[in-house]
Image (cartoon, rainbow, N blue to C red):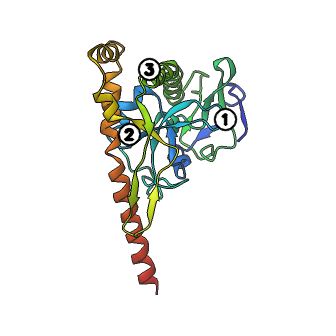
Amino acid sequence: MRLIELSRSEHSGLRIRAERVTASAANQHLIPIVVSEFRKAAIEYPIVFAKHPETGRFAPYVLNGLGVEENLFWSGTELDVAYVPLNVRRQPFYVGMNNALCIDLEHPCIDPTGQKTIVNPDGSDSAYLKEILTILGELVSAKEATEQFIAAALALDLLAPIRLDIVLDEEKPLQLQGLYGVDEDRFRQLGEREVAQLWKAGYLDLIYSLLIASGQVFKLIRLRNQRTALGRAWHSNAR
């Protein structure tokens, strides 16, 4: 990665191959999201929480696979999903110090043959760059709301380790570790006052989205079993 601050004049000639943007997620089993994405993400992915290895702080992620660096939604050419997280779509752009717009000049989506441009011939921001700025703006604006939601969930002891023992068709048990989700039993035990506080803060919808999303793990199991079956069929035909 070579991250530098974007200069509309100096980098006006850069072109982006949009089809390579989602390829950056091909080996990501966890992709960070923000609370404004919960409803959309819940239709596709399990939404989980994990602690930062250095700070120990929780953050929300969509879970894409049942193993490290496994994305079961990656078809080989695209993400086969209805919703692509903001942190994928913003590539190769980042928010730097003092909210400066930065770009990774070593990202594979930067290519002279790309169809997306950063600026128009008159030097104004292209429609593509305006879309990227909107995405980055949502990520930045939702960061504090995401942290506040996590703080509220922790204060009510609503986050608990996910203990999900999975046995796949290949008969190999697989355990997800280091991931957290909403403790549904604890949520049901909340008093009226606590529920009212969550409702007033706008958190009830987020919690329900998380509960709905938890069922998407069965989609991951199905996708893994399908991939295993295809692998077996390929090896069988290759003999």
Residue 152 badge: 3
Residue 83 badge: 2
Q: Position of residue 177 (x, y in %)?
A: 50, 48
Whether tag 3 and tag 1 are in contact, CB under 8 A, the answer is no
Residue at image mark 1: 54
The amino acid on which the numbered mark 1 sits, given as a three-letter code, is Glu
Q: Secondary structure at mark 2?
A: loop
Rendered residue at 69%/39% (across/down): 105
Q: Position of residue 69 (x, y in %)?
A: 55, 53
Number of numbered callouts drawn: 3
Along the horizontal axis of the image, is 202 left or right of 180? left
The amino acid on which the numbered mark 2 sits, given as a three-letter code, is Tyr
Tell me which numbered mark, 3 or 1, is placed earlier along the sequence.
Answer: 1
Gap between marks 2 and 1, in whole Å? 30 Å
Tell me which numbered mark, 2 or 1, is placed earlier along the sequence.
Answer: 1
Q: Position of residue 55 (x, y in %)?
A: 64, 31
Please tell me how crowded label 1 is: few (under 14), some (14-19), or many (20+) other residues with Cα within 10 Å.
few
